[in-house]
């Protein structure tokens, strides 16, 4: 793949990971209740969960690409539309991050397992990967090297994102609990998602 494609994927992934969801809510809840020590086990659990979800998604994408290039193109169109819809929904979302501190004593293994389950079994995550990844895959190139690089990049970013959220939540609680801060994050992320979806639609139309 080209360097531009990888940089675009990296930038898009970084933005999407910052947007709060069920996983970030769980991370913040543990960090608010038990401090910065939750960061590492939660980050490992989230990375494993994302790896599980991405693997399931990529198996489906690989089978689809092998079956029909036309179906894969249709999936890209559907994925671009989904990104626009997700961006609009995120823009209209409220600004509050309803994370209650988890005061129950939890071992590192329990936190890791909890983060893995929440991340891996989130149906929105599976849907998102299926919609998001095809936008950057070139069907003319070998699939495995592309998805391996994308997966490694995403997992590293996801790990770093969880560490950052956990440390901020444990040290600057008012920031993650501020509706204004969350509103800015949601609207910025929503705008970028809409822009990415529109740009993808325009690119597909230009190639048609």
Image: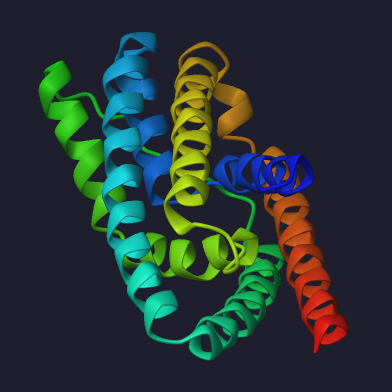
Q: Residue at x 81, y 65 (%)?
A: 195
Tag count: 0
Give the percent coordinates (x, y) of residue 99: 41, 40
Q: Residue at x 33, y 36 (%)?
A: 46
Does residue 155 sit above or below 182 in this rendering? above
Instruction: Depth check: give the residue in front, 134 or 49.
Output: 134
Residue 121 location, quadrant:
bottom left
Does residue 136 sit above or below 87 in this rendering? above
Residue 3 location, quadrant:
top right
Would residue 113 be found to the left or right of residue 166 on screen? left
Q: Residue at x 83, y 70 (%)?
A: 199
Would residue 156 be found to the left or right of residue 9 on screen? left
Question: How is the model colour-coded?
Answer: rainbow
Does residue 135 sit above or below 187 in this rendering? below
Give the percent coordinates (x, y) of residue 156: 48, 28
Instruction: Depth check: give the residue in front, 25 or 203.
Output: 203
Would residue 56 be found to the left or right of residue 164 on screen? left
Give the percent coordinates (x, y) of residue 207: 82, 82
Q: Is residue 106 visible?
A: no
Would residue 71 be found to the left or right of residue 77 on screen? left
Give the percent coordinates (x, y) of residue 40: 33, 16
Q: Is residue 128 visible?
A: yes
Q: Residue at x 57, y 31 (%)?
A: 176
Q: Quadrant of the C terminus?
A: bottom right
Instruction: Depth check: give the residue in front, 43 or 187.
Output: 43
Does residue 97 sit above or below 55 in this rendering? above
């Amino acid at each position: 793949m080209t360097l531009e494609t990888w940089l675009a994927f990296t930038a898009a992934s970084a933005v999407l990971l910052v947007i709060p969801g069920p996983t970030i809510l769980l991370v913040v809840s543990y960090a608010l209740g038990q401090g910065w020590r939750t960061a590492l086990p939660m980050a490992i659990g989230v990375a494993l969960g994302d790896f599980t979800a991405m693997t399931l998604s990529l198996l489906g994408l690989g089978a689809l690409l092998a079956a029909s290039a036309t179906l894969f193109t249709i999936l890209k169109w559907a994925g671009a539309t989904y990104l626009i819809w997700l961006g609009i929904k995120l823009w209209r979302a409220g600004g509050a991050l309803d994370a209650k501190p988890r005061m129950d004593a939890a071992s590192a293994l329990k936190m890791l397992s909890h983060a893995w389950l929440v991340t891996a079994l989130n149906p929105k995550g599976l849907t998102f990967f299926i919609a998001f990844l095809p936008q950057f895959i070139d069907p003319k190139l070998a699939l495995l090297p592309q998805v391996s690089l994308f997966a490694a990049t995403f997992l590293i970013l996801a790990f770093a994102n969880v560490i950052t959220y956990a440390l901020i939540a444990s040290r600057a609680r008012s920031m993650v609990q501020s509706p204004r801060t969350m509103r800015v994050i949601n609207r910025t992320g929503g705008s970028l998602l809409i822009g990415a979806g529109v740009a993808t639609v325009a690119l597909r139309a230009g190639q048609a």
